[in-house]
Structures are given as C-alpha cells and as structure tokens.
Amino acid sequence: QVQLVESGGGLVQAGGSLRLSCAASGRTFSSYAMGWFRQAAGKEREFVAGISYNGGNTRYADSVKGRFTISRDNAKNTVSVQMNSLEPEDTAVYYCAASLKWGSYYWTRTSYMDYWGKGTLVTVSS
C-alpha cells in the first residue's frame, strides 16, 4: 500500500509558476506509475500529467502541454510537477495518484489509479 501526501499548492498570479510535490510512503514506490490529476469546482476530476514507473515515459493533457513538466525521484519516493505560465483555468485541487498498472492507457485515467492523496489547492488569479 502507498500513502501519498501533496504539497506546494497556493495562490499565484496568472503567468506565474508553482511546483507541486508528492511524497510517497512505502518501499515499492518505483513499481508505481504516478499521475497528477485536478478537480475544479463543479467539474469532474481530470488527468493532468503522468509518468511511468522508471520515468521513461510521460504523458500530458493537451491543456497543459508545454507548460507543465512531471518528474520523479525514485530514490526519494517523490513525484513533482513544475507548472509554468499558469492560467486562471488551472485553478483546482491537484491530486497525486499511483497506479500499479503498466501502460499509459491506465495511468492517465482516474478510474485506473489505485491510490490517491488528499490534494492541494492551486489558485491562479487573473
């Protein structure tokens, strides 16, 4: 089992940057694909960025391509997402999630993630 704790959320002006981090417990972190998802008020949770177990494969939602970068450090049991050129539309609660399923088809979809953090709020002001 994996426990996930997000950090780094906050208030930022449009055009600014934030870096979210997720710390994972457990000795098998390197076995999991990891993803970042977000949920804006009144909307469904959606995929943002994902990374394979060894960091060799990444995926991004079209809305964040070129602005967000996901990375992981298996030695430190952490996964991060660097968010640049933030827009008010990026305002949401951001969740870190882990999946034991191999293949980006799975770890880019909320229904296939096995573990979730509690989320961290990102607010982008215009």
Image (cartoon, rainbow, N blue to C red):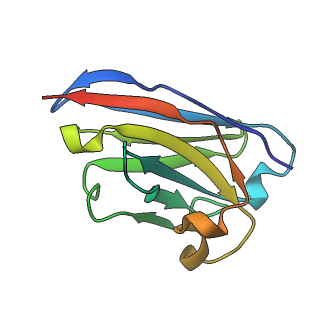
Q: Name the quadrant containing residue 24.
A: top right
Q: What residue is at 23 percent from the left and 44 percent from the top?
A: 89
Q: What residue is at 55 percent from the left and 60 percent from the top?
A: 51
Pick the front one: 34 or 117: 117
Q: Is residue 89 left or right of residue 73?
A: left
Q: Is residue 57 left or right of residue 89?
A: right
Residue 115 visible: yes
Q: Is residue 87 left or right of residue 17?
A: left
Report the number of discs. Answer: 0
Q: What residue is at 25 percent from the left and 30 percent from the top?
A: 124
Which image quarter is the C terminus in? top left
Q: Residue furthest top?
A: 11
- Residue 62 vertical placement versus 30 (above, below): below
- Residue 94 vertical placement versus 102 (above, below): above
Percent across and percent down for residue 25 are 80, 37
Q: Residue furthest left?
A: 126
- Residue 62 vertical placement versus 45 (above, below): below
Q: What residue is at 37 percent from the left and 48 percent from the top?
A: 42
Q: Name the quadrant containing residue 111.
A: bottom right
Percent across and percent down for residue 90 are 28, 43
Pick the front one: 119 or 50: 119
Residue 87 visible: no
Q: Name the quadrant containing residue 110.
A: bottom right
Percent across and percent down for residue 78 are 64, 39
